[in-house]
Image: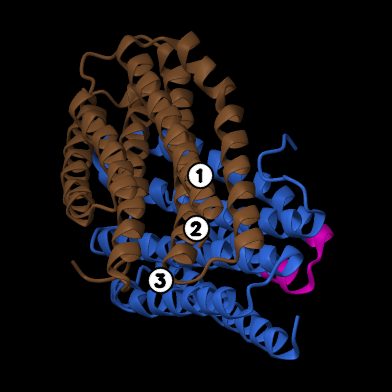
Chain colours: A blue, B brown
Amino acid sequence: MTKHFHRELENIKKRVLTLGSLVEDRVRSAVKALEEMDGAAAAEIVRLDYEVDEMEVEIEEECLKVLALHQPVAVDLRFIVAVIKINNELERIGDQAVNIAQRVEIIARRPKPPFTFDYAVMSEKAIRMLKMSLDALVNLDVDLAYKVITMDDEVDQIKKDAYDKIKQAIQELPERVGYYINLLLISRHLERLGDHSTNIAEEVIYLVEGEIFRHAQY
Amino acid sequence: MTKHFHRELENIKKRVLTLGSLVEDRVRSAVKALEEMDGAAAAEIVRLDYEVDEMEVEIEEECLKVLALHQPVAVDLRFIVAVIKINNELERIGDQAVNIAQRVEIIARRPKPPFTFDYAVMSEKAIRMLKMSLDALVNLDVDLAYKVITMDDEVDQIKKDAYDKIKQAIQELPERVGYYINLLLISRHLERLGDHSTNIAEEVIYLVEGEIFRHAQY
């Protein structure tokens, strides 16, 4: 492959990382809005989602252009296809931030019930998974990618914990079921966030090991 | 492009449709297991998910092979990339069938509460969206693809209805909150099913109209 091709590949990598930072930022903001029960901040996250969407579309266009112009094969081809899919995952991570923000918009207007669930640890883990999966992509670091997959179980465990506690809270305070279901949905959005990062990590492993990892039993 | 290329393209199309039929079948089985509260049938759906996974991997390999061998450009390139993404959506539709089946496995063991929600209409709509989105792909039928997108609102509406009714049921019978939350999650899985079909329809529109539809405000 030509120098020109590799320059374009580097450019695409950079843009994927920029999108990664953007969605990470959106997730952090959504979690902050949740902690502070800030409905206005949540609404702003929803409003700004078009930026993520635009960036995703641009990166995909760039990938298609490189495919058409340079017609890469083997490892380079697989890399571009992986980027197209990872780009898609990042956009969906942005959607999860929006989903969390929409829940916050709803519950921020209502009085806080005596028990709520603290999502600080779960969201920190989910954000770390996202960062690690992108680092794994940039450095083609399979070990790091495997770590992301292991962390997914931890996030799932916290979700189960949230589920049990919130279920209990509903039984004690059934008149607040609406509030609690929204709180419960936030744990699902955080879990989905972890799933998308896991998908990214699996793409990286697939890319490097050249074998089908995605659906293996691990 | 050569005759050989177009034959391979036809072959890929056929395999995507086979995968489409397979996941449709899985969704139907999951909904049937729900209606009949058949835990054993649900377990079988979970067990057989590897077939969907394997088929997805094979189709992606096929697409990569065609990209490398024939180095298509323009419309042909876009088509292959669309197929890679649609293939991915189909696998996730299979996952939703598994998710529903897992919920059924849990609630089938428990006594039925006096109120339950009938998901027949919602699941019929979601399955129709899937079929229509695949027809739209095969015939590159943009009008049909737009219809899928319209139907997504109807599915969302039923989900809201399910939410309201189940919330009410929890308030009346808080000791059955565990059962009801599982029932509620089924409506989310059916909604996600509709989302994946919408994604397929949007890919088709994008493919045909050559412009960015996915994130347009419609």
Question: Tag on residue A33?
Answer: 3
Of the 4 image quadrants, the one containing the N terminus of chain A is bottom right
Secondary structure at numbered mark 1: helix
Mark 3 vs mark 2, CA separation in Å: 41 Å
| Pointer 1 and pointer 3 on the same chain | no
Residue contact between numbered discs 1 and 3, judged by CB atoms under 8 Å: no
Q: Position of residue B8 (x, y in %)?
A: 54, 47
Question: Tag on residue B12?
Answer: 1
Of the 4 image quadrants, the one containing the C terminus of chain A is top right
Secondary structure at numbered mark 3: helix
| Pointer 3 and pointer 2 on the same chain | no
- Residue name at image x 33 percent, y 42 percent: B134
Mark 1 vs mark 2, CA separation in Å: 9 Å
Q: Is residue A137 magenta?
A: yes
Q: Position of residue A20 (x, y in %)?
A: 57, 74
Q: Is residue B124 magenta?
A: no
Q: Disc 3 marks which amino acid?
A: Ala
Q: Disc 2 marks which amino acid?
A: Ile
Instruction: Decide which of tag 1 and tag 2 comes sooner along the chain.
Output: 1
